[in-house]
Each structure stands twice: as C-alpha cells, then as structure tokens.
Image (tube, rainbow, N blue to C red):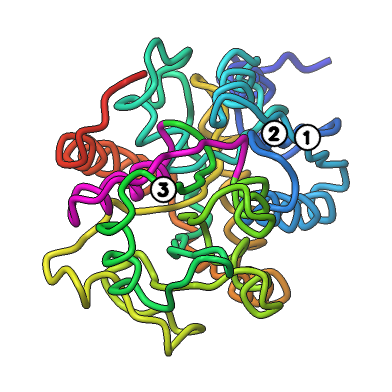
Amino acid sequence: MKTRSLSTVITIAVLSMPGGPAFAQSFPTKSIRMIVPFPPASGLDTMGRLVSQKLSESFGQPVVVENRAGANGMIGSELVARSAPDGYTLLTGTSSTHASSPFSIKNLSYDPVKDFTPITAGVTTTIVLAAATSLPVNSVKELLEYAKRNPGKLSYSSSGTGGALHMVGEMFKSSFNIDILHVPYKGSAPAITALATGEVTLSFNGTSESVALAKAGKIRILAVAEPKRYIHLPDVPALAELLPNYERPPGWFGFFGPAGMQQTVVARLNGEMVKALNAPDVSDKLDQVGLTVIGNTPSEFATLLKRSIELYGVAAKLAGVKPE
C-alpha cells in the first residue's frame, strides 16, 4: 500500500479547509438568509428578491429573503453584523445603513466598515422630491414661494432618521433656507404612502416607490434630486437646474456579509450576484423602477463605501445634521 507524500497530504488538507477552493466549490450546502433591513415593497426589497431568486437557481439551495425593518435599517444590519461569517447570512445594505448613519445616529450599534464584508454594489438609486396633490404647487419654484409664505406648515417624509433621504431633505432645506418638518418612517414604502394619504405634504424618496403613484395621480413629482434629469422622467427638472453647484452624495444598494468571511466564498457570491444583476430579466425590472445596475468587485465596493462615508460627512456638516 502506497503512502502519500507530505506535499499530497498538505494539499488535501488545504483543499478541505473552510475557505479553501473545495469549500468554495461546494458552497452553499444549505439555505441562505438574505436580510432586507426595511419593509417590503421598496426598491431595496425588489433588488434583494430578484437577486435571491437567481441565486437560488444557481446554487440549487433556497435563498430566503427576510424583512427585518426598524431603526432606519439598524436592526437588520446589526443582525447580520453579529452573525457567523460563513456566507449563510447576508445583507442588502444601503448608503443609508452604511454611509450616512454614522453622522446622524447616536450610538450606532455596528461599525459600517469593520463589521461587514462588502460583496458587491448592486445598483445606484435616483431620488425625487414629490408633493401631495392637495398642496397648491406644481414646481419647485412655487414650492419655495409657498414655504416662504407658510413657514412651519410643510412636512416631508423619509425612510428614517439619519438615512440618505433624510440627509437629502436637510440639504434641500439648508440650500433654500426654508422651514420644513422632517417626519421619519420605517422605510421608503411607508414614507411615500404617507404622502399619498396626506399625512405629510412632501417626500424625498426613490423612483421605485414614487413613479407608479405619480402616474396614478396620487402624488406629484416636482424634481429629481440629482445633478441631471432622470432618463425615464425627461420632463421633470433636476435640482441642479435650480442649484448649479448641487451634488448629493451617492445613493446605492449593495450586498454585504459579516466581517471575516472567507475570500473564496466572497468571490463565489460576488460572481453569482454580478451575473444575476446583469441578467436581462433582472436588469430590465430594476431599470423600470429607477435602479441602475453596478455589479462591481468587492474591492471596488469597499472603495465606493469609503468615498460615500466621506461625502455624507461633508453633507451632514453642510445641512447641519447631527447625531440624534
């Protein structure tokens, strides 16, 4: 009986170690949890479910979406941060949960960088400024005139205190020196519903939540809160047309795991996620709700995250946003 050489034994051991090539090839061997830290019916939820379905097909294992909403995404994000770094608990994070929250939420229960493994940035988002149909304005100019005449009578909804939508709203108030009350909700879907039902008069929200309601005549989109017009709303002006130097920090949705994940598993997840995002039936549906596919590498996503945190820090100072 032949004995194995030392090099052969070492090779077999390495291949069978957690995180080795053999482990990555066999991953996953059980169902994966995909945590969405906001309620259903949002753009983030749409992205998470579309990609999860593709991953289920590719892996031959269920990828189950769980909505763990609350505290502007902090509850679901913390759940993932405290999970085992084995690739079986993942997060659909946002520029709110990972870039703006450090500047607006006291005692944030996780470190957006140290407690997570970036896998890929999924999509960029487009934000709009929408008004209730009961509000007698049809443009940003008319809105500003109304706000000056009626200080303190306007309110705007966002997906939660400290989120990207809240930050954009405060930047808008600061830029035009107007008084509008911020009303936070537990996600973008309830925030835009509050506008449609008249609980608030304005909302900063994503196109994925807003366009359908606008087409149904339930809300009125006054502007795109972006440097340029949105391709699917060509007649709606961009805020940069009123504020020549306007630039908001980047808005995105992406996929994370807990810190300390094996790089081979990260690479496998990244490859399948990027493939899923670029599948025509997925990218087309994302485009229809105002989400543009990114699908980059883990290192590129880490760079985007770092830059986003820097820009939200600047925005927080400009808008006078402080942790609360």
* Category of crowding for the residue at label 1, using alpha-carbon neighbours closer than 10 angstroms: few (below 14), some (14–19), many (at least 20): some
Describe residue 69's horizontal placement relative to residue 257 as left or right.
right
Specify start and end residues of the magenta stretch as a single range. Answer: 162-187
Residue 74 is labelled as: none
The residue that mark 1 highlights is: 66
From the top left corner, tell me how far across and down residue 275 is, in percent: 63, 62
Q: Residue at x 59, y 13 (%)?
A: 82
Amino acid type at image mark 3: Lys
Q: Earlier in the sequence, mark 2 or mark 3?
A: 2
State whether residue 162 is above or below residue 196: above
Q: How many marks?
A: 3
Q: CA distance from mark 2 to mark 1?
A: 5 Å
Q: In front of the other: label 3 or label 1?
A: 3
The answer to whether the residue labelled 2 contacts the one labelled 1, judged by CB atoms less than 8 Å apart, is yes
Q: In front of the other: label 2 or label 3?
A: 3
Residue 8 can be seen in this image: no
Q: Earlier in the sequence, mark 3 or mark 1?
A: 1
Residue 153 is labelled as: 3
Examine the image and state in which quarter residue 99 appears: top left
Quarter holding the C terminus is top left
| SS at circle 2 | strand
From the top left corner, tell me how far across and down residue 77 is, in percent: 57, 26
| SS at circle 1 | strand
